[in-house]
Amino acid sequence: MADILQRRPRFMLVSDLDWTMVDHNDATHEKLRRFNRLWLTEFAPDSLLVFSSGRSPELFHELASEVPLLKPDILVCSVGTEILINGQADAEWEAHLNEGWDRAAAEGIAAKLPELEMQRESEQRPHKISYKLRVADPDRVLGALRSDLAAAGLDTNVIFSGGEDLDILPSRASKGKALSFLLKQFESGPGLPEAGVMVCGDSGNDIELFVVPGVHGCMVANAHKELRDWCEANMHDRIFAATQDGPGGIYEALHHFSFPNPAKADTVHRRQAVCAQQAWAEEWCNGSVPQDDAACEAHMLEGFEEDFEYVHSSGQLMTRRDLTDWFASEGYACCAGGSKAAAAAGGDRGAAPVPAAPGTAGVSPGAGTGSGSEASGSGRLCMWVDRYSERQLAQGVWLARWMELYQPFVAGKHTAGERTAKWASAVLRQHEGDAYRFAYLHESPVPREQARA
């Protein structure tokens, strides 16, 4: 926890999750993965990614197994009532919220309103009581609840968002107050983010993020009426109304406010090399790039050293020539793209394991006759990189390490059970300019429970 709070970030991005960072209508999550590539290469080296969600930690991890979220630096859950850094709760924030909070009394008053329907148990948190309110005139119920809480002498914050979600919190808690608390920690320590803070949201419980002094705001195109009305009434030059939904709007806002670092750090070029190889492997798996011998060999010559070695997690060693031959003759998208490539992500349970290509994290290139074929339909196998780190070995030679995840995505289906991941360690050698090539790559499997944000 201390490490993050002891370094002054260049920039901080604070985003809601559902329908903001995650567009649930984007079946292959291409907009989110485009944001991921931008963040991993240009922002992650010197900036902080903060997710601020109404979800409990349990529901956050459920979402993180279903969509390609990056691992955040800081996680704010339960409508700002929980702050977690490296998975650990901020005890100072918890103590701050305890003062004057009487959860049992607030719940007793809410129980007298029959229109309020208690949400699932996981969403009832120490400093949050959550309900569903599905009536034609929510303002009437909200007014009665706030009046009754005040009459009982309870200092609370009642938040209504998304047209049906109602939360009762301590008056000291909200997404905005949690962000202000974090910023005060930075201000009293290493310093506030140099380039600023951008908040992103789509609903009423995001409004308090936008009122934190000095922040820039991105209202995604699919925002609910309560946030849209507030932004229209309070519009200024630091609020951006995106033209794209969800993560597409965030990507748009980052460039609108010119937050990408104009002075590219040296690490960006190595990160771009890793992401470019991963992107090519994904296109290969889905049959979206030429798969003849010449095209495969040209790619290998461009991205891999002549003395390149690939060590599969099984221990099998492959040279660049071996790898080129495997891709051109047996690669799992040579005779099937799209749905069959996605089916192969589940692995052919009856097939012998075949070493995967670098950047494909060890996917078995079977025919997809296992359970993956039923779940995949006409979906797309997607790959993304997360948790990148590096250190220099010699002049122009770097050891890079990252987690690569892969999962088929299909409209209308949850494929979390088909996600797998590998830790990859690679040696990258610099060539003319800022070009880097792979000299060595080794992969190790990751337990399924770790293959999420």
Image (cartoon, rainbow, N blue to C red):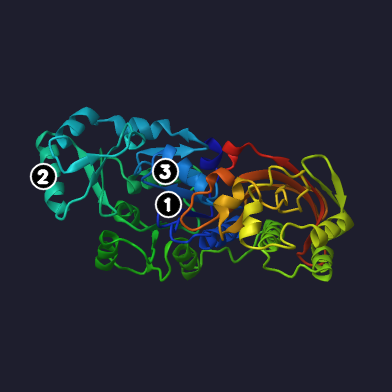
Residue bearing the label numbered 1: 17
State the separation of the CA atoms marked 3 and 1: 11 Å
Please determine whether, in this image, residue 136 is positioned above or below residue 451. Answer: below
Q: Earlier in the sequence, mark 3 or mark 1?
A: 1
**x%, y% of residue 87?**
50, 35
Residue occupied by mark 3? 76
Where is residue 19? Give x, y as percent.
40, 57
Q: Nearer the viewer, residue 127 or 141?
A: 141
Give, as a three-letter code, the residue at label 3. Val
Q: Residue at x 35, y 39 (%)?
A: 81
Depth check: 163 or 333 in front?
A: 333
**Residue 452 visible here:** no
Q: Nearer the viewer, residue 262 or 288?
A: 288
Q: Amino acid at mark 1?
A: Leu
- Residue 11 position, x and y percent, is 51, 55
- Residue placed at 77% from the left, 41% from the top? 313
Report crowding for label 1: few under 14, some 14 to 19, many 20 or more residues within 10 A (C-alpha): many
Q: How many marks?
A: 3
Mark 2 lies on residue: 144
- Residue 161 in sight from this viewpoint: yes
Label 2 sits on what residue type?
A: Ala
Which element type, helix, strand or loop, lies under badge 1? Answer: loop
Q: CA distance from mark 2 to mark 3?
A: 29 Å
User: Tag 3, which secondary structure?
Assistant: strand
Q: Residue at x 41, y 48 (%)?
A: 52
